[in-house]
Image: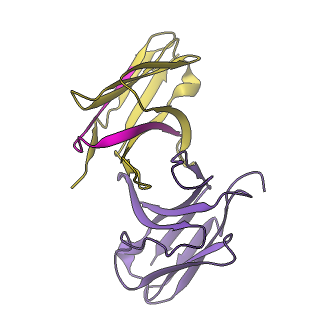
Amino acid sequence: QKEVEQNSGPLSVPEGAIASLNCTYSDRGSQSFFWYRQYSGKSPELIMSIYSNGDKEDGRFTAQLNKASQYVSLLIRDSQPSDSATYLCASSGAGSYQLTFGKGTKLSVIP
Amino acid sequence: GAGVSQSPSNKVTEKGKDVELRCDPISGHTALYWYRQSLGQGLEFLIYFQGNSAPDKSGLPSDRFSAERTGGSVSTLTIQRTQQEDSAVYLCASSTGTGDLKLFFGSGTQLSVL
């Protein structure tokens, strides 16, 4: 059973701080990793994808991948109240079209 | 269209009734997915369509669930003889095609079975 695990939170950070969201996955063959943001009552929205070990930066967001340790993380710098949402981690194996999603971590940025 | 469109946005039905949920993917997207999200749960894969290939139905929870995609575009998810445990948000997503896992989700259909 392929699993993606996330701390459900809530994770509370003050405005302007760095929010760190973590995710582990069980399938060592996983190749593609994604972070989705889901506001309450809304559908998931893709914010980052990462395929290689290391860091990938996009604006205030940095995704980090460590395949040896089977974890993925998302850092949000200069957190804003508008970042308050549930963040879903997802992974997929080589050649697979199915994404396995974690249950998400709820982030709350306190003004 | 500009995004993935789903209808209805909300559906309340009585136990035992059949329901149909509709999804219109982004124009040009050949891959279409249905997921289900129950309260406090992760997204559960239901079914995948890619072009004219046979769909992957491996995620459908029972034979009461079926889906079709006409003309490689619009998809309909049908749930027969609905049960209370079917209550969830049903999300449709599309992507440009094989190998592209960047999914764009619709706003979902909130299904409530009384």
| Image quadrant where one finds the N terminus of chain B | bottom right
Tell me where residue B9 appears, x and y as whole percent: 63, 64
Residue farthest toward the right in the current orientation of the protein: B1
Q: Which chain is yellow?
A: A
Check the image and tell me how it is coloured: by chain
- Nearer to me, A51 or B111: A51
Question: Which of the pair A60/B49 is nearer the observer?
Answer: B49
Residue at the image point whose x is 34% and y is 45% from the top: A102
Q: Which chain is purple?
A: B
- Quadrant housing residue A59: top right
Which residue does the image show at 24% across and 45% down from the upper left? A27
Q: Position of A104 compared to B13: left or right?
A: left
Total numbered circles: 0
Does residue A37 belong to the magenta stretch?
Answer: yes
In the picture, which quadrant includes the C terminus of chain B?
A: bottom left
| Left/right of residue A101 with respect to residue A2 in the rendered view | right
Can residue B39 be seen?
A: no
Instruction: Decide: is B63 above or below A64.
Output: below
Q: Is residue B84 magenta?
A: no
Instruction: Please name the predominant secondary structure of the magenta segment in the image.
Output: strand
Residue B59 drawn above or below residue A48: below
The magenta stretch is A20-38
* Residue B99 appears anywhere in the view: yes
Q: Where's residue B109, x and y in %?
A: 57, 65
